[in-house]
Amino acid sequence: MPVYPSARGVRWPGPSTPPATSASRATALFVAGFMTYWPIALACDAAGGGLGVQAMIGALTWLLLAVALWHAPAGLRTPALAMVVVATAFECLGSLIWCAYRYRYHNLPLYVPPGHGLFYLAALRLCLLPTLRRHGRAIVAAIVLASAGWVLHGLLVGPRADVVGALCWLLLVFFLRRGRDPLLFAVTFGLTMVLEFYGTAVGTWHWAAVFPHTGLPAGNPPSAIGAGYCVLDALAMRLAGRFSH
């Protein structure tokens, strides 16, 4: 079975059969389940049930991550777990310390760390689909153009110019041009932006109007904040490579 190269010795299996395989169907079912679960989970948290509801969502999310890892291809388990570690560290930094964004109760909800694991596992599995691989260049180009349009909207429309979003877009372009796997970066960016739009819309979290200690204005969410996940992806793969040795 062919493999796609990854960072620091991490190599995850690539597709060797047509799309209509059991592996592709399993990926489609997993992604569909994930895309159904997280809107419900975030909506339940936003409904104001308190820390008890957050704890129940957290316990369920950890359980779902354990099941998802059990059934995932072996080469994807370590990167997904590495993402839990990396993303949790950045959540503590960005939310609890820097206060660039805040969750509903000004805490780090217990479902966030395993949620990152499920999110990244979904992105990794999507990127193994033969159809996405065949159209990788077109997907990357579409992400660049669509995000550029939204960044211009953020700069020109609204109560303040979304400078943070524009800077994030430059970061996205860098990763798509120079990164290890542009398709993976494009997919994680797209999924992150969908998550950001929904999470901020229902009030599960909100972004600061001006980033602390920088004076840079930002949208809610910043128009290309999904580029931050490119950084998390690169760090998670590097960490996973260390685990695999």
Image: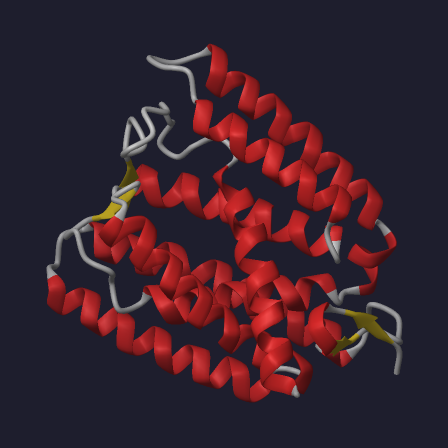
Judge from the rendering whether residue 225 lies leftward or rightward of residue 4; answer left or right: left
User: Does residue 8 appear in this view?
Assistant: yes
Image: 194 above or below 42: above
Camera-side residue of 117 and 45? 117
Q: Residue at x 68, y 37 (%)?
A: 173
Instruction: Kindly indicate the quadrant of the structure image that contains residue 64.
Output: bottom left
Residue 123 in percent (x, y) is at 61, 61
Judge from the rendering whether residue 178 lies leftward or rightward of residue 152; answer left or right: right
Q: Residue at x 82, y 41 (%)?
A: 138
Q: Residue at x 87, y 55 (%)?
A: 134
Judge from the rendering whether residue 243 lies leftward or rightward of residue 59; answer left or right: right
Residue 198 in percent (x, y) is at 39, 43
**In the rendered image, which quarter contains the C terminus?**
bottom right
**In the rendered image, which quarter contains the N terminus?**
bottom right
Instruction: Kindly indicate the quadrant of the structure image that contains residue 137.
Output: top right
Image: 120 above or below 183: below
Residue 104 in percent (x, y) is at 19, 49
Q: Residue at x 53, y 26 (%)?
A: 166
Image: 84 above or below 175: below
Marker count (numbered): 0
Q: Residue furthest front?
A: 213
Camera-side residue of 87 and 157? 87
Image: 209 above or below 244: above
Residue 18 in percent (x, y) is at 88, 70
